[in-house]
Image (cartoon, rainbow, N blue to C red):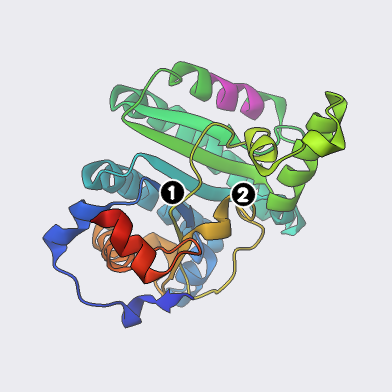
Amino acid sequence: MTLMANEKTELAKNDTDNKVPGHVAIIMDGNGRWAKQRGLPRAEGHRQGTENLRRIIRASVEFGVEILTIYAFSTENWNRPRREVNLLMQILEMVIDRELAELNEEGVQIRHIGELDGIAGRLQKKVIEACETTKNNNRLILNVAFNYGGRDEIVHAVQHIMNKGIPAEDITEDLISQHLYTGGLPDPDLIIRTSGEYRLSNFLIWQGAYSEHYYTDVYWPDFGKECLRDALDEFASRRRRFGKTDEQIDAEND
């Protein structure tokens, strides 16, 4: 069951640290509507969304989040107007050029999840360079889902397993998880979506099977540090059962 942000239970701010999700994933939605609401071009919404990402990365580190996964560009986004697609590609390239040195200095490890095929060669090289430059950092893992689709990810995982000649009877959930783009990382504890939409939109559909969800009407450019804290407070107030009864959970915690 999911809860809207305005339905969250009240929780003391200093309680967040007691139950911080190790892995937070965010569907950064609402840039275009943010711009339209202000009479600005969509391009400005995307630029402001990029500026906000810097704030959320820093806030995530401050709050003790260990892995942050962001949905930057989906496989479905190729259906948008060519001009907007080109703009999104330019913004990613600009972000790498402008932010890579500082993110590396701050200990952020950048990982790309998705396919590089179809992306311009120059941008591919910059994505690979960013991942290679920061691969030994361990303060925060930043997964950038760019040219990513959850169903496509599962198809690729199954294809890789089949190409290895692994017998059908040896295929397990763990084996499939290992062959996903996020192989080796824990599944997200919390998935956040901004802008008032109530769906995953093909984002981490395997990994998010037991994730808590948090939806807010706030558009992404306005989803700042305090909004993230509200989401973490809401997460801290929930009891994750994973199929167990309350009595079983209480017994384990005794």
Q: Nearer the viewer, residue 152 or 52?
A: 152
Rendered location of residue 150, percent (x, y): 68, 51
Could you tell which of marks 2 and 1 lies nearer the N-terminus?
Answer: 1
Residue that numbered label 2 is attached to:
73
Q: Is residue 239 visible?
A: no
Above or below residue 66? Residue 233 is below
Quadrant hosting residue 16: bottom left
* Residue at the image point whose x is 32% and y is 27% from the top: 102
Point 46% across, 30% down: residue: 110
Which residues are the magenta region? 123-129
Q: Secondary structure at mark 2?
A: strand
- Residue under numbered circle 1: 50
* 92 lies left or right of 206: left
Name the magenta segment's main secondary structure: helix
Viewer-closest of 109 and 172: 172
Identify the residue at horizontal 31%, vertical 30% (top origin).
139
Binning the other alpha carbons within 10 Å of mark 1 as few (below 14), some (14 to 19) or many (20 upward) gives many
